[in-house]
Each structure stands twice: as structure tokens, then as C-alpha cells.
Amino acid sequence: MNMKPVRLDDVAQLINDAKHLVALTGAGISKESNVPTFRGPDGLWRNYDVTKLATPQAFAENPSLVWEWYSWRQDLISKCKPNPAHLTLAKWEQDGLLKSIITQNVDGLHRIAGSKRVFEIHGNIWITKCTDCGFKTELSEPATHIPICPDCNGLMRPDVVWFGESLDILTMRYVEDELTTTDVMLVIGTSAVVQPAASFPLIAKDYGATVIEVNIEPTPITQILDYHILGKAGEVLPTLDTFIDHQDPD
Ligand code: OAD
């Protein structure tokens, strides 16, 4: 693959000058926090069968098995902390540089890092939703049994998007606004193979944005994007930050 060499100070300048900087993140940004990714050598989908764990049919057939898996993931995530990549994005938002994060991650680490405008398009592993009445509640610790709806006694499920399900319409409206407004987009730690998120960088590009990918390897969209920074998000983002012109508050 033929890739243009990238100067980090040039990319930092683009970030610095952006009017509407948006970040799209995937499992790779949380890898250095020890949250497993889905694909790749240790990826979850290599060791677990998605059809038995992350589809509405799987939940209908065996809710206990599905909850066992989510409870295991909740336990794992509860021991993880945001890494320098999450923290740099949160800092950039506080400084007014970054307008929003669109994330495919359900781990909630962006919010824990301090980011406020976060669109969790695949949901959040700590929120549960009643399969009968839709009532939602937040868990403060990993589920130890199948949660039951306090309102109607229905079975609660994790409020995450499973294969074959649509994304939340309201969230998608906000995301569309971001994609058509952004002038510089960072695409961090996603394999860019799951739709619709895989198309977001291309939509942003069609609307005129400069798109910068940060990943430890090329992805199917690398060639189409403007810049590819090869490296770990937790190292690349803090390095970019050293070139950013942070204004002192008045
Ligand atoms: P994947 O597991 O498919 O891809 C992770 C990406 O992160 C890969 O491209 C890696 O090369 C990259 N990566 C790994 N470590 C990195 C690091 N330290 N720094 C930068 N990049 C790194 O994860 P996603 O693309 O997020 O959906 O997966 C998309 C969706 O597929 C998930 O949200 C999930 C899954 O099935 C649902 O569950 C609905």
C-alpha cells in the first residue's frame, strides 16, 4: 500500500485551524486501556460467536447466556481507565477545539475522561432497557443476574445495538449534522468495516472535510482519506497535542 508520509506538526496545524473538529472512534482507542477490540488477533469476535451473543434472536433464545457475556464485559470494563487518547480528546473539547465525538464504543470511557458531547451510536454497556416497555436504567456495577424491569417486570437487556438492529434515530440526526458540518475529522481506532460508521468518514469527506485516520494498521478506507497516521492512539494524540497552540484563558 502506497501511503503519503505524514508530518505530525502539519496535522496538528489542521486540528488547530479547524472550525468544527469531530472525532470518530472505535475499539482501538480503548485498546491501551485494556478493553479488547472486536477484530484482530485477540479480538472478541475471534473467540466468541456473534450470532449467539449480540443479536436479538440470541437474547430471545438464551437471555442468561447473553447477560453472562455482557456481565463479563462490564466487569472487565469496570477495571479500565481512560488512556491518554481519551484524555487528549476531552482536553481538546474543554479548550473549544473539538466539537464532538462519535463513538462506536459502548465502554463509556470518553465520558469518564471528561468528554461531554459524545454520541454513542452503538449504545452504552451500563444502560439496560426493558424489552417490553422500553424503560431504561443505569447499572452501577456488573449485572449478577438478568435485570428485571422495575416498571413492568419485563426482561431488561443491555442498551447496545446488536447485529440486525437499527441505530437510534435521534442520535443519528445529531450525527448527520456533525458529518455535514465538520471541516476536519479524526478517525481513531476503527477497522471501518461495520456500517453505517464505516461510511461516516466518506460522508464527511463528500461534504468537504479533511479526514485524518489514526490506526496501528491501514483500513479499507485508508487510501480514500487525506492522512493516515500509523501508531497507537494513546501515543499519537498526546504527541499531536504538543504541537497544538493552546490559548491561555483570559
Ligand atoms: P474493531 O475491533 O473492528 O477494530 C479495531 C481497530 O482499532 C482496528 O483497525 C485496529 O487496527 C485498531 N487499533 C487497535 N489498537 C489500536 C491502538 N492502540 N491505537 C489505534 N488503533 C488501534 O473495532 P471497531 O471498528 O470499533 O459493534 O468495531 C466496530 C463495531 O464492530 C463495534 O462497535 C462492534 C463490533 O461488532 C457492535 O457491537 C454493534
Image (spheres, helix red, strand yellow):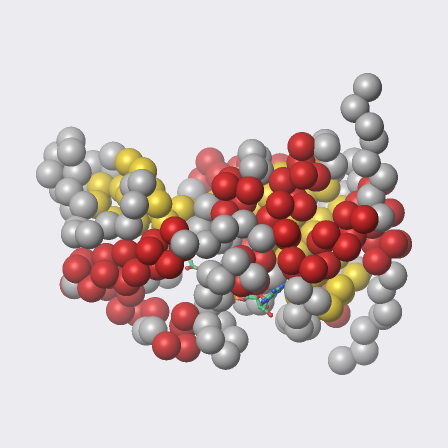
Instruction: Depth check: give the residue in front, 69 or 130.
Output: 69
Q: Quadrant of residue 154?
A: top left
Q: Position of residue 172 (x, y in %)?
A: 51, 42
Q: Is residue 47 left or right of residue 212?
A: left
Q: Position of residue 128 (x, y in %)?
A: 28, 43
Q: Quadrant of residue 132?
A: top left
Residue found 56% across the figure and 37% down from its top: 114
Q: Is residue 150 shown to the viewer in this render?
A: yes
Q: Is residue 60 shown to the viewer in this render?
A: no
- Of all residues, the one furthest to the top in this rendering is 250
As displayed, is residue 14 above or below residue 94? below
Instruction: Depth check: give the residue in front, 74 or 164.
Output: 74
Task: Report the quarter where the N terminus lies.
Answer: bottom right
Q: Is residue 50 left or right of residue 4?
A: left
As displayed, is residue 62 above or below residue 247? below
Q: Is residue 148 left or right of residue 192?
A: left
Instruction: Depth check: give the residue in front, 47 or 221.
Output: 47
Residue found 28% across the figure and 36% down from its top: 137
Q: Position of residue 100 (x, y in %)?
A: 62, 39
Q: Is residue 205 left or right of residue 52?
A: right
Task: Report the quarter where the C terminus lies.
Answer: top right
Residue found 41% across the figure and 77% down from its top: 46
Q: Position of residue 161 (x, y in %)?
A: 38, 52
Residue found 46% across the figure and 46% down from its top: 108
